[in-house]
Image (spheres, coloured by chain):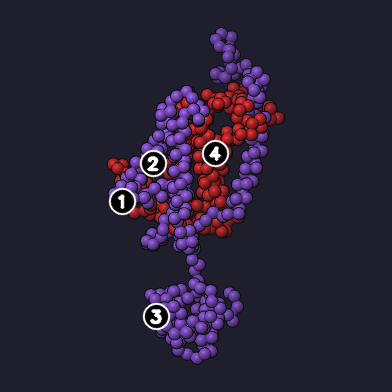
Chain colours: A red, B purple
Amino acid sequence: MLQKVYDWVDERLDITPLWRDIADHEVPEHVNPAHHFSAFVYCFGGLTFFVVVIQILSGMFLTMYYVPDIIHAYESVYYLQNEVTHGLIVRGMHHWGASLVIVMMFLHTLRVFFTGSYKKPRELNWVVGVLLFFVILGLGFTGYLLPWDMKAYFATVVGLEIAESAPVIGGFARTLLAGGEIIGAQTLARFFAIHVFFLPGALLGLLGAHFFMIRKQGISGPL
Amino acid sequence: MHRGKGMKFVGDSRVPAERKPNIPKDYSEYPGKTEAFWPNFLLREWMVGAVFLIGFLVLTVAHPAPLERIADPTDSGYIPLPDWYFLFLYQLLKYEFAAGQYTVVGAVLMPGVAFGALLLVPWLDSGKERRPLKRPIASGLMMLGVASIIFLTWESVDEHDWEAAAQQGEIVDDVEVDETAEGYEIYQSQESCIGCHGGDMLGGAAGPNIFESDYDKDAVMDIIINGADGMPADQFEGSDEELETLAEFIANDGQDPNGDDE
């Protein structure tokens, strides 16, 4: 049955070459922990992606309750945390996942660096990877404000002060992020938009480029 | 791929009529023990992922995500703290060479140079050699960077007053005082109590929230009679019975000890 559906679609859209491109690639011995246990360091990138997927899914569920508004933001998070069935777990996954994705990404960066995998012809993929690093730090920074509790608010005050101290673009960057003179309703709305639309958009685009380049170039050879 | 004359298409589309077989490549000629990603390797990866997910869920259930009280922009005494992965930047700004008039150094210049260098690594270290020990300058600089991040994070965690931090953000329970209780009436007749602790019993100009500390009835009576730090003694005007009722009311967190829970 499934095969028939597949064939029906394949006849019309010729998806087999596409599927083979995605699924068909080799896993060399030197990156396979089944053959060399030390090769587990090659898992960090995949685990980073795994946690990113967890973040996207749990984040989607969080927005079912979250209200980006200074009066209701805190109340909605409090309600989700204390009243909603399994809300504690969904919020917990997003909270701890944010830390975990940074840890995994850090380890992945170190692995790529110390195996010299960024060298020709993989320079561009390294650059895209570092941009991904920045995007994820940005997601961490903007997401921290959203619960609108004490530590969220005052960490953002400090963060925006730091942004403002940058020469030339400082004032502009601060206004862009805070949406005005005071850190308040406008800031929360902007951080929400950045956290939920702008940065995830950039993240998905960069991830696509990251994976495309890996597939095109293959994984770097053994040292 | 078949090109040119003799090609057949599906209807008037550009999809070739000839089907490509959906079979995996043969990896037996590849070096070493190369195996196919799909499905062999992915299956095993999924098992590792499942174990990882279980550990992650255990963490989530064991340590609920923290939530402090609602943001109060007027609380200027709050000591701010970013998430842990920004602590190293936060700590950097505490040093003299990177603070005050040199804030630009700590906030922009040093992180800018570090992250800029990270971005340009392939061109800063463009030699062919990949082994870390054969390119000591690159490896050394990276180790230095990692070590300073770890050091700064450590210092920041060490300097931060975690107990004060936990306290300053605590969610304060709204105490609902039972205004029909006998004890409440007695309180309202005591000018000296209201003067410091406020008409709502939740603290005022000179005294704290009465329900803030957990004292039992006898301790409350003792404080009212003998005073406590900053609180004068013998201010209560009334009978011993009234004093007892009031103390019981306070020890019972503002609820009538004789009334039923409604």
Under tag 1, what secondary structure? helix
Reading the image, the residue beneath label 3 is: B195
Residue A48, disc: 4
Q: Which residue is rendered at x = 48% and y = 63% of the image?
A: B167
Picture coordinates of residue B93, whole percent (x, y): 37, 49
Circles 3 and 1 in contact, beta carbons < 8 Å:
no
Mark 2–mark 1 distance (CA, rounded to whole Å): 17 Å
In front: label 2 or label 4: 2
Q: Which residue is rendered at x = 56% and y = 78% of the image?
A: B216
Tell me which amino acid carries mark 2: Pro
Tell me which amino acid carries mark 3: Gly
Reading the image, the residue beneath label 2 is: B111
The answer to whether marks 3 and 1 sit on the same chain is yes
Reading the image, the residue beneath label 1 is: B100
Picture coordinates of residue B66, whole percent (x, y): 52, 56
In front: label 2 or label 3: 2
Residue found at the very far top of the displayed protein: B5
Mark 2–mark 3 distance (CA, rounded to whole Å): 54 Å
Mark 1 Cα-neighbour bin, 10 Å: few <14, some 14–19, many ≥20 = few
Picture coordinates of residue A125, whole percent (x, y): 48, 29
